[in-house]
Amino acid sequence: MEKTIFEVKQLNASYGQEVILKNLDFSIKEGEVIGIIGESGIGKSTFLECLLGNIHQKVMMNASEMKFLEENWLTLSSKKRREYLRQDIGIIFQNGQHSIDPLFTIGQQLEEIMLEANPQKIIEALKMVQLEEKVLQLYPHELSGGMLQRVMIAMAFINYPKLIIADEPFSALDVPLQMEMMQLIVHLAKQYRTATIMVTHQRELAYKFCTKVLTLEEGKLVAQKEDSHKKFNFNRLSNEKKEVFFQLKHVTSHYKDENVILKNLTLDIPKYEVTGIIGHSGAGKTTLARILSGFIPYEGHILIEGKELREVLAQEKQSYYRRVQYLFQNSLLSFNPNQTILKSLEEPLRFIRKIKDRSERIRMIQELFTNLELELDWLEKYPHQLSGGQCQRCAIARAIFAQPECLICDEITSSLDDANQEKVIQVLQKVQEETNMTIVFISHNQSLIEAICSTVVALKEGQLIETLI
């Protein structure tokens, strides 16, 4: 019979009057990999904080029973709990770049967390996550996102803990890397019989690899069957009717050191439809988006409705920036943190549409929010007071006020859970239905791209490898 590693009964947690967790029961045995999924803000991270005993001062928490390796976790001294956290619990954080000290080499940091110095064990830990020994001499900023996440996994497993807690460990990675990291963690968990709690919004990964998947809803963990990806009804025109918005011929782009990002790219982006651009990290997706948005130079030819993009930018740059709107991956950073959402949304109406009457601007904003089924009370909030999904929907609304002909969406759903991702896509769908807008949708989520795009362009190492219609 498998040994129970962690068990909690009737766990309750609340922020003031807001109940987050309610009479929640949970247990995990050695070798189990349990996926925890749920909407943003539902309490997944609070649940992990309660298990670790690292709760925010504003959180009220209680449980009838909480045991780790048969020890009463609720009555343990702080010193004893810290010993367990160092020896028997490994943590994999969401963002390796923010979780690793930038002033020390990878080797120094691995050495620091070891229970006893053992250079050979450090080398073995790197091999375990398929990293070369030379990584020990490098600093965090010298590693890619995928390599940093491997280092985080090595740090978590280096002392052979009894329990691993992974909090959204793949959200910043593209799909192939997510798959690779998930396979690695599951492989190590099985090899060392390590109980693993995996909090993620990547539902497909959770159902594919985890022993069990639980959904956090209404304060409790419940088991649910896997649901398939929803199909969205965006404009899909027959091939005979297609007009071209962007026509790219032999487009090339490279860094100052001559390293090529895009190489001899030739393709057409049709009008009035959603064109998906997919590829691994570093494939050139964002570079292409920035070129089409007029942000960076290029070699070759790009025609927009028959005119060379360079010439359009030289003659009417401001007009072009109105016609082609760019939506950023991190919408929070695209808003002025010192302005309310209402104030930010007024700017395109005031400066691009030249609407001087403030009451008219407010009326137009409220009308659009109602039409897009957005909450009017968001308007009085500051960007940091909104969730990622709410902020992204407000960014779409702001772009619409410029009355663009084309929206370029650069990984706008990559950091969102499935529920918020769907809400953002529904807003885009409604916008396209009413305006017949051309949309370029960049993502590393293949199932989402296939659900919403009529044309899919696949990039690899800066080159076009496939176009699917």
Image (cartoon, rainbow, N blue to C red):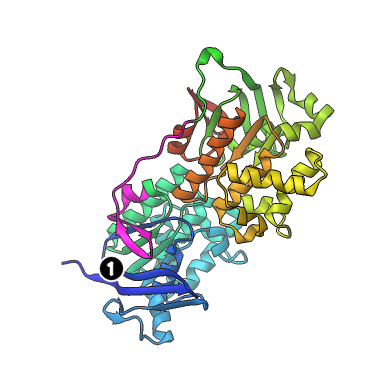
Q: In this view, does 141 lie to the left or right of 41?
A: right
**Residue in view at x 68 percent, y 37 percent:** 325
**Residue in view at x 82 percent, y 39 percent:** 354
| Horizontal and vertical percent position of residue 262 | 62, 31
- First to last magenta residue range: 205-233
Q: Is residue 188 left or right of residue 4?
A: right
| Label 1 Cα neighbours within 10 Å, binned few <14 / some 14-19 / many ≥20 | some
Please say whether residue 220 is one of the residues in the magenta stretch.
Answer: yes
| Horizontal and vertical percent position of residue 430 | 55, 36
Q: Is residue 124 left or right of residue 329?
A: left
**On-image quarter of the N terminus:** bottom left
In depth, the one of 367 and 190 nearer the eye is 367
Residue 51 falls in image quadrant: bottom left
Total labels: the figure holds 1
Q: What residue type is labelled 1?
A: Ser
Dot 1: what SS?
strand
Please say whether residue 86 is one of the residues in the magenta stretch.
Answer: no
- The residue most toward the left is 1
Is residue 394 positioned above or below 446 on the image?
Answer: below
In depth, the one of 381 and 247 nearer the eye is 381
**Residue in view at x 65 percent, y 31 percent:** 406
Instruction: Specify whether residue 301 is in view.
Output: yes
Instruction: Specify whether residue 283 is in view.
Output: no
Residue 283 falls in image quadrant: top right
Q: Mark 1 points at which residue?
A: 27
| Horizontal and vertical percent position of residue 185 | 37, 56
